[in-house]
Image (cartoon, grey):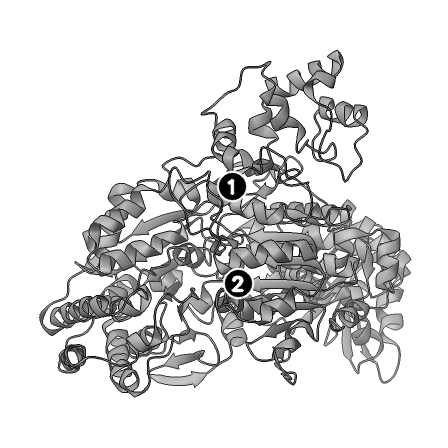
Amino acid sequence: MINRYSSRRESVSESLLNKHLLNAKSYDRIAGYFRSSIFEVAGEAIESVTGKIRVVCNSDLQSEDVKTAKLASNSIRKEWCEGKPEERVLIKERYYRLYENLKSGKIEVRALPSDKFGLIHGKAGVITLEDGKKTAFLGSINESKSAWELNYELAWEDNSDEAVKWVQEEFDALWNDICAIPLSEFVIEDIKRIADRTELKSVEDWRRLDKGPPAIAVESPVYREQLGLWEHQKYFVDLAYKEHRTPYGARYILADQVGLGKTIQLALSAQLMALYSDKPVLIMAPKTLIWQWQDELKTLLDLPIAVWDGRNWVDENGLKYPNRGSQDIVKCPRRIGIISQGLITSGSSVQDYLLSKEYACVIVDEAHRSRRRNLGIGKEHLAPDMNNLYKFLMKISLNTHSMLLATATPIQLYPIELWDLLNILSQKNDSVLGSLSSYWRKTSKLSEGLELITGKRSIPFFDPENWEWVRNPFPPSHENPHFNVLRLSDSFNLRTDQFVISKSLMELSPIERSMIGFILSTGFYQKHNPYIRHVIRRERSYLEDTLDPTTGEPYLQKIDVQLHGEGDEGALVLTGYMKQAYELAEEFCNLLSKRVHGAGFFKTLLLKRIGSSLEAGKNTGYKMLQEWGNGGLELYEEEDETEKDYSESDIKNLTAGEHELLKRFVYALDSNEATDPKYYKTVELLKDYKWLNKGVIIFSQYLDTARWVAQKLSKEFDSVPIALYAGGTESGVYLDGVYSRKTKEEIKIGVKKHEFKVLVGTDAASEGLNLQTLATLINLDLPWNPTRLEQRKGRIQRIGQINPTVYIFNMRYKDSVEDRVHELLSTRLKGITEIFGQLPDVLEDVWIQVALGEQKEAEKIIDNVPKVHPFENRYNMGVEHIDWETCSNVLSKREKREYFLNSWD
């Protein structure tokens, strides 16, 4: 029998759905599009079904997204969150019952990728009635409240055996498809969280009720639009927030390896500290990173934030605020402000205004740039000759409750550099290095302290000197689970903000001496020294190889890396005019170096550019000829800030000899019709190595190189869109040689949806970009700042990567500066990346010395790099499972945004 239903004539949900589902034995449903609303239909009727309820639906997933169970689970999680179920008006009791039914397996849901069958417009269902008979229905109705009760919908019911069999076959085919994804555990638990959800209406309520980080984080975009935080990230944020609430504040160096997400850890910590205190938060970062910081706080945490661009404050919408002078730097229009470290390194007068404020927290990214000038073996006993950034941080440390320093390389060349960072943190109180009389603070004792913690030196067990190292600072009991530390803290009546034991060794009781002896015998110098307690450093290999006891899975998904181009295949030969042009560039830079003092990167700029590509070298030669003779050459945006060590008058104009060499250089490249060998190698990798099929990111540090190769590839590969991801408004897509402008956000979405298999990026793409859908990486150039290679690799070697192995090819011209440096590093620093997790930034000087022909100086820098990490792997314990995901008490999003819109005034 056929029944026809129209929502114009009657309630379809009452006439068809509720009537048949009441006490039914089972229900199979092809539901259309996946959204949280598929659970809102039928109410008590669907809950009265005695048997199984199965729902198969469509999703925005791609087939490639479901290659692994982990990736499939993450994909369905993101799609669930995109429906914003937490913002819907809910009947809590129904959601509780829904959770119980999903948890027990009575209700099952599977989702199909949209590219498997196309969007599922066919909606149908089979209901096994209370008496065992079956009926089937077809219609336009999605499984949502609006579809069943509000929209104009049509449905046809047919209980004939033929109709029921036909619909059941369609359902079974979809349900059993290999790409059908079961509802993830996250979604099921999130239903319970939402059922329990209550909203805190004010920041004061959040503070008073002590709801902590999860109430702020769990509904932020990083959780609802991304995949949340890894366990090591939550561990640091939780630790920093807890310490911030103490009388002495949080004082930490976050030294995780590149690619482990330091920025989001610091950003979330900044958010929490700003919410807990009415004072502002100041973030200091290199100029090249300030806008990335603003973007990450906006997109991952939904935070309004302002950046000082050198003249004005610029808010998250790009709005500039009127500038009435340098004093405006302390009139930030947002609770959190970001400034460039260049303001400090250049000696700008604005630093005096910054020092006039009190802060809840100061965060310094790339903090290793604050360094002493008098570095070297045997100089540890000398007071540090501080650079401008170091001096400033020593002062502002006194003006902030908490301070977080971030660097992936806390030790560049000498262990004393880590002490310098701790010295900055220690200015506020005694929690870091103890009081002014502490052995850990005294420059005359620095070498001894380092030797003690690395095991190079030992002190006889009963020597009174041991007590001096132990008592100041004494490890706080809340940081240290050691039973004797807790007992001694009680014995000495130490308050939570006290870190120095005033008793001398002679004043200790026999029991106290015994407990001190036990602490020393169980590894005090290795386990409880200040260097360990205030540095948080987790290594990728540790996180990949260590199982989380709560899940039985590694803390971090393991991604193997196969590196190509390390041998002769990566050294590409230049011939004819191309070789002549490179030789002229070397001659030009050598001639310039004899006249200009300092300014290493200025003297080698042309070599850096031609080392990227012949196209970049030619463009730079033209620019130098046009601009240098007309008032000086401006800094390129890719260059890092350094303290000026040159005179602008020295480099303002070219000499006649320099000008002639530069003209010959440009002529050699202009008259050369041969194609750059880097392009041919790229095409070979994409075609012969099949990297195009795997998806590829092609990196260059310079826009002109990236734009050149993207345009040529778009002509080489017909109908293949080549995406260009660059800073500012330079991003776009080349198709058959034709360029169309796209935003960076559009490029990101296109890569995620597998629309772009080839992405060409400048170093704007090396940070904060998730490229899990791409499995290969080509470095067209080797950046002279080695950190950037690790940052680039981190775009594809990251959680969610659908391939167990990623492939990387590093290009360089044979006999170039890069080739010579590569040979030096590979022969003299075997395994260094395992020691540091990356090459230390100071090795950038190696490139400059090699470019200037100073081979011996380059070798000296390399040989000074420690062959063994001074503190081995003792930092790696900073990770454990912390449950934020089930938090149901959340701070109002509107209230949070309003709070951060407040200015510093």
Compared with 175, 160 (above or below) is below
Q: Amino acid type of disc 1?
A: Glu
| Residue 540 on image: x %, y % | 49, 44
User: Is residue 319 depicted above or below 225 in this figure?
Assistant: below
Mark drawn on residue 544? 1
Tell me: 556 left or right of 194.
left
The residue depicted at 53 percent of the width and 76 percent of the height is: 746
Q: From the viewer's perspective, is 617 left or right of 704?
A: left
Task: Please provide percent x and percent y for residue 903.
Answer: 74, 73
Labels 1 and 2: the sequence-earlier one? 1
Residue at 48%, 25% (x, y): give it.
455
Residue placed most toward the observer, 145 or 382:
382
**SS at mark 1?**
helix
Q: Give the residue type at disc 2.
A: Gly
Residue 845 coordinates in the image, percent (x, y): 32, 56
State the quadrant of the N terminus.
bottom right
In what quadrant of the picture does the C terminus appear? bottom right
Which residue has dot 2 on it?
A: 768
